Amino acid sequence: MKFKSIPIIALIALKFIIAQPEELDLDNTTSNGSVQGAFGAVTIDGKIWNQIALRPILPFGKLSVAFDMVIYIDQDGNIHDDEWDFSTSEKVKNTIIDKIYYVRYGNRWDRNYFKIGALDNVTIGYGILLNNYSNTLLYPQVRKVGMEFRTRSFDVNIHGFTNDFKENMGLAGMRLSAPVPYGFTAGVSWVGDRNQYLGLRDRDDDGRPDLVDDFPNDRKWWLDTDGDGWADNDTLNEFDVDGDGWTDSSFTFPLWGIVIDPDGVSTKPEPINIKKETETFNSFALDVGTPILREGSISIDAYAQIAYLLGKTTNPIDSTQINAGHGIIPLGLAAKFGRAKFNFEFRMVPSGNFEFGYFNRSYEIERATFQSISGNQGTIITKSKKLGTYGKQNGYYSSLGIDLGSLFDAVMAFQNLNGEQYNLESNSFEEASNQSFTAILRLKKPISKIEKASWFYQQRNVPNPFDFEYSESTIMGYNLGLKLGNGMVLTYVFRRTFQDMNGDGDVLDANEMINMTSVETSFSF
């Protein structure tokens, strides 16, 4: 789609459009309605697009609605169509859903709360299954509209979530907790992914992942055997499907009763259809906790957890299918000392095939990847299939959140497990470390012209995260906002993730480093 008068369209679009989640701090808005606009540039699929945005926030008492509408325009005046696709009923549904950043009732600490839209940090219970999950990691390339809710009924606390209504709730979870005798609180949790293949990107929503779809932007076609740009089943244009120079007999025989193509037509096999083929994975956990100290600004709680991953994984030595495992936290401590928060857990994996916090911030990237691709066929490796590389392990986890004076706060978390890890070179399990590290640094209030600033880094399940050897679990980035005067703020957002596109076990190949950059100027009116 082309527009010859971009300035005019820009002025019109400013009446209807909104920016991306990382620039928005909508959860902290007041009960008053507001409208914010923005313009700038953003990277989508490695290409720079200009964006025009507006942010209307409509409050109705405890209920708030924030819209998420945006137009991206490239240097030639082309509109990025994905956000405005009304070609099918499914696309209409997804386009309308995409225009909502959130619908929120109350706050997370209220008795009754729900939020529909972008989920930036969701943890269920003490986090043994779902820990710091986010559905915004690949925004704006992938836009998800999920839901989180909390309520209390008959003295039972209920906490649930789903990742994306456009996936028809592909990933979902719930926890029920209630007081039990002797001052304890007990909880039971379930998290399930009804189809891990939904982690494979499918822009045209035809069920064939982009990496094996010869027409990733056209849902009518997906096969092009001879690579001439015409689909195999496009009977109006494609008369030689295999490209051997002979007209296919499907055209010549019905008309003239002759066969021109002597060796027949050999076509590519059909690629996987992730709307029909599925791979589910479920999990459940039990937890119990109790307060052991309450004195002024000091509080200490003790808890224990056990979790089971329910599904199959792959034994990396002989490629046989085996059951996923379970993990135990026999003792955990959560303490608060004034402005500092501290957690410590002993962790055990008795039989391997388990990952603590399996559904985490990088889950949507690790959910499913292709190991190898030949033509339009590939071997799909889901995250659950990689659990077999973890053997029996024991260790600890610790986290610290602290205010660094009046200007900054910081959060750091570290896991150190020791035990058996699979070694690809020797095709055997060896004694090794399994470590994870997360760090977040945030500016609490403006300094001079700096309106806001934050930095984050995550790396999970590697021998040493301080070697900074990237993997699919590596996430890093920063946000920076500068005051320009007259209520305008220049915001720069950078985010880097990694995805193993060819399944070779590393993220060092071309296109496996995914950088997303956004520069915008925002204003309120």
Image (cartoon, helix red, strand yellow):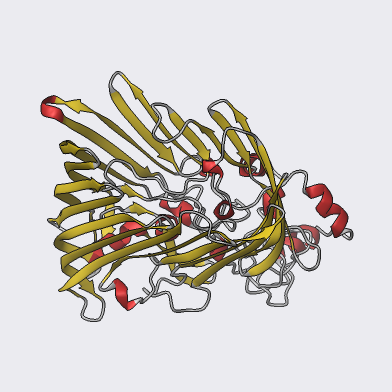
Question: In x, y percent, where is residue 455?
Answer: 45, 64
Q: Position of residue 154 (x, y in %)?
A: 30, 18
**157 left or right of 184 in image:** right
- Looking at the rendered image, the quarter that the N terminus falls into is bottom right
Q: Residue 8 sits in which quadrant?
A: bottom right
> Looking at the image, which residue sits at the far bottom?
425
| Quadrant of the image occupied by residue 432 | bottom left
Q: Quadrant of the C terminus?
A: top right
Left or right side of 361 for 47 = right
Location of residue 192 with respect to 386 vertically, above or below: above
Residue 92 seen: no
Q: Is residue 430 depicted above or below 87 in this figure?
A: below
For the view shown, which residue lies furthest in the top direction?
A: 154
Residue shown at 45% from the left, 67% from the top: 499
What residue lies at 61% left-to-right and 70% top-to-bottom?
A: 46
Say which residue appears at 54% left-offset and 69% top-offset.
515
